[in-house]
């Protein structure tokens, strides 16, 4: 991968990515930004199986539902 954007929920456990875009209305974008998910943010997927995802951004961990994760476009990076 590495060169194209994909929805966050496609990123496998243990993989890292940078947020490239949030494809949603302003209210959801604002909510995600308050959680630390903003353009350019580096995140790591801690859990991505059944149920919500668990992400690590900096020293914080957060839970994000799959529906919301679909709206976050990321580019996979090698950590």
Image (cartoon, grey):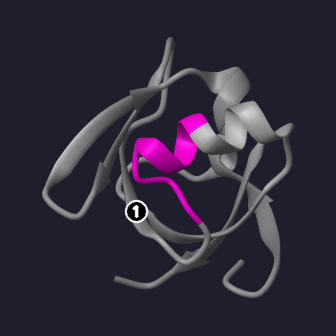
Q: Which residue is mark 1?
A: 43
Front residue of this view, candidates 11 and 31? 31
Quadrant including the C terminus: bottom left
Where does residue 67 sit, x and y in percent of width and height? 72, 22
Could one spot residue 76 in this view of the protein? yes
Identify the magenta region. Answer: 31-38
Question: Compared to 78, does 42 lie above or below?
Answer: above
Quadrant including the N terminus: bottom right
Residue 76 picture quarter: bottom right
Disc 1, SS: strand
Is 59 magenta? The answer is no
Front residue of this view, candidates 38 and 27? 27
Residue located 62% across and 42% down the image: 30
Where does residue 77 sit, x and y in percent of width and height? 51, 82
Residue located 64% across and 49% down the image: 8
Where does residue 2 sit, x and y in percent of width and height? 67, 84
Residue 57 picture quarter: bottom left
Is 32 magenta? The answer is yes
Could one spot residue 70 in this view of the protein? no
């Amino acid at each position: 991968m590495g060169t194209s954007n994909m929805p966050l929920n496609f990123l496998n456990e243990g993989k890292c990515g940078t947020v490239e875009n949030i494809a949603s209305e302003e209210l959801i974008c604002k909510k995600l930004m308050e959680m630390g998910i903003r353009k350019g943010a580096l995140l790591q997927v801690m859990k991505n199986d059944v149920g919500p995802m668990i992400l690590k951004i900096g020293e914080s961990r957060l839970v994000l539902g799959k529906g919301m994760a679909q709206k976050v476009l990321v580019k996979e990076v090698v950590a």
